[in-house]
Amino acid sequence: MTNAPKRDVLVSEVGPRDGLQSIQAIMPLAAKKAWVTAAAAAGVPEIEVGSFVPAHILPQLADTAELVAHALTIAGLSVAVLVPNFKGAQAAVASGAHKLTLPLSVSETHSLRNLRRNHAQMLDEVRQIAALIKSLPAGQRPHFEGSLSTAFGCTLEGVVPEQRVVELAVALMEAGCDEVGLSDTTGYANPAQVKRLIKSIWSAVGRDQLSGIHLHNTRGQGLANVVAALDMGLTTIDASLGGLGGCPFAPGASGNIVTEDLVFMLEAMGLRTGIDLDALFAVREIVSAALPGEPLYGMTPLAGLPLGFVPATTKQHQ
Ligand code: ZN
């Protein structure tokens, strides 16, 4: 008999990647390891631990390979990384990470600015990565997701046509991704748009090919957008501990949606995450001690759990 909790929703912690890449301070490797260990011990099933980008571009994530090696020692933890291109994917495959996510900006202007590649060039990288993964023995192939970033709007191009998002979802699948993900990089999304886009992508590539969403809370729509995605039937939600990373465009607003508030909402709604909230709140101490002066967001850790609150994950053990 296994003790692994049953989960209705997979919460993927992206703080060590998305959070840390957005702030100036560089978290020491020992603190990153402690964070990953404590989050996994709290029941977080998947952690995006870093990104395989050159250290001169993101010195905050220069130790990604070491952190992957550490995370792989934690039984049951799914270890995810971001890769910007084929070269990054080679390093990611060598590291042994379980999941590779390649961001493809639907806004070509953003793609050129961010990764210096247009869509055709990015899709070439995807094809090379897919071939590399296919060349590995069946049991050693990482899961390969193409993430449609700026899918809900772009700070450079403004409105992003939904048809364009769908076309690129199809192109990513044809180029060899295992699935696509939706990403509101800019915090532009609203719940109606979330539902519409999921529906359109599903009808173009199939329901099993889109299961996750990455949301930012820049305009306070984060959890409302999560509920919209859940209503549609998505099952993987990215979030960042303490909403780490903030948002340069909206002072005082968190960047990614806050893991603690997300887990509280899901558990209160009767959806099991397998995550222990008190243990999760305690992880904040590790992160804040390692990043002095860096604000951590989140309402639930400050307000505390409601009197008499029983999380859905606990109920299953009773
Ligand atoms: Zn993000």
Image: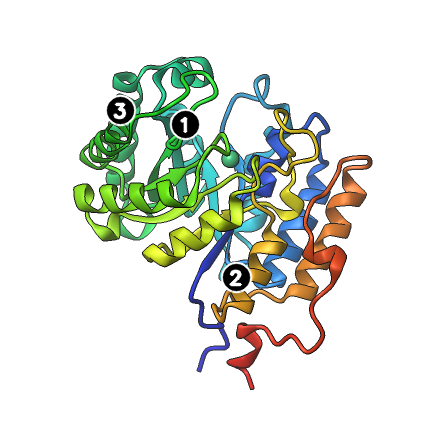
The residue that appears at 49% across and 30% down in the rendered structure is 186
Q: Is residue 47 visible?
A: no
Percent x, y of residue 142: 35, 45
Q: What residue sits right under mark 3 in the picture?
A: 123
Expressed as whole percent of the image width and height from the top left, the position of residue 272 reads: 49, 69
- Placement of 237 over or under 90, stated as above or below: below
Dot 1 amino acid type: Gly
Residue bearing mark 2: 75
Residue at numbered disc 1: 153
> Is label 1 in contact with label 3 (beta carbons under 8 Å)?
no
**Between marks 1 and 2 in the image, the one whose residue lies nearer the viewer:** 1
CA gap, disc 3 and disc 2: 34 Å
Residue 269: percent from left, percent from top:
50, 68
Label 1 Cα neighbours within 10 Å, binned few <14 / some 14-19 / many ≥20:
many
Query: Is disc 3 placed on a helix, strand or loop?
Result: helix
Q: Is mark 2 within 8 Å of ligand 1?
A: no
Rendering quarter of residue 318: bottom right
Mark 3: give few (<14), some (14-19) or many (20+) Cα within 10 Å. Answer: many
